[in-house]
Image (cartoon, rainbow, N blue to C red):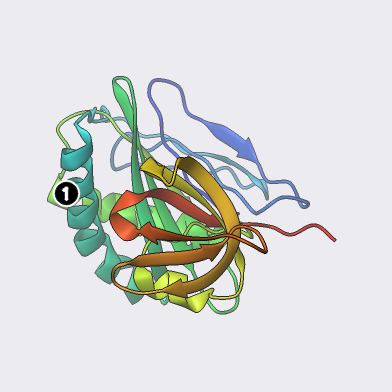
Amino acid sequence: NPKVVGSNPAPATIFVSWFERLSLEGVHRGRRIKESPLVGLFVRWAMCPFFVFGAGQSDVSARVVELQQLLAPVIEALGYELWGVELVAHGRHSLLRIYIDHDEGITVEDCATASRQASAALDVADPFHGAYTLEVSSPGWDRPLFSEAQFRRYIGERVKVKLAYPVQGKRNCSGRLLAADAEGLEIEVSAETCLRLPLAAIKKANLAIESD
């Protein structure tokens, strides 16, 4: 899957494998960004310092909503769908991951374009108060699911779900998605067992890739 990342202090590089989801990584430390001309290998860097962001879970959730509202018009103006936003704390560093999608798929060039525009919007809005790493990625085959509408889109497919707290004794489950509404999900985990999961309990959800 295509993706764009920034980290401090050294610029990051990523080689995009033809057999993996397309991926692009780089370093976003300010406004002046350069890219190497090599296909599939990108180095991105700039001269200004990163921001560091760390917060509690409720603060992160509020930040995600703010970032979605900030970035959705930017991504949609480029002709892509903002599939989702993740904000992950790594000690003094945080990762801002933006997923973009398109009916015809996402390329490395799409990610690079979205990364530049998202970086510019973040520079202007300045929503952080510390260092962060920016990553722009396609959802990939095991795409994350963020909303009721996205869950409804994949009713009948297999999903993997991590829970913030146990539901019927389970913190992780996988199975076929039978239903999705504003209250939660219904997942068939076996021929005999269906689980009803409140949306509030879902920490992370992805499509599950089925092997032949």
Image quarter of residue 116: bottom left
Residue 78 seen from this side? no
Task: Residue 28 in the image: state x and y as whole percent.
Answer: 37, 38
Q: Establish if 136 lies above or below 147.
A: above
Is residue 18 rendered to the left or right of residue 2?
Answer: right
Task: Residue 26 in the image: state x and y as whole percent.
Answer: 48, 39
Q: Nearer the viewer, residue 49 or 173?
A: 173
Q: Residue at x 45, y 40 (%)?
A: 169
As drawn, the residue found furthest toward the front would be 192
Q: Residue at x 38, y 24 (%)?
A: 8
Q: Residue at x 78, y 51 (%)?
A: 19
Q: Name the residue carrying label 1.
A: 62
Task: Residue 125 in the image: state x and y as whole percent.
Answer: 14, 51
- At label 1, which amino acid type do we have? Ala
Q: Establish if 119 lies above or below 175.
A: above
Label 1 secondary element: helix
Image quarter of residue 176: bottom right
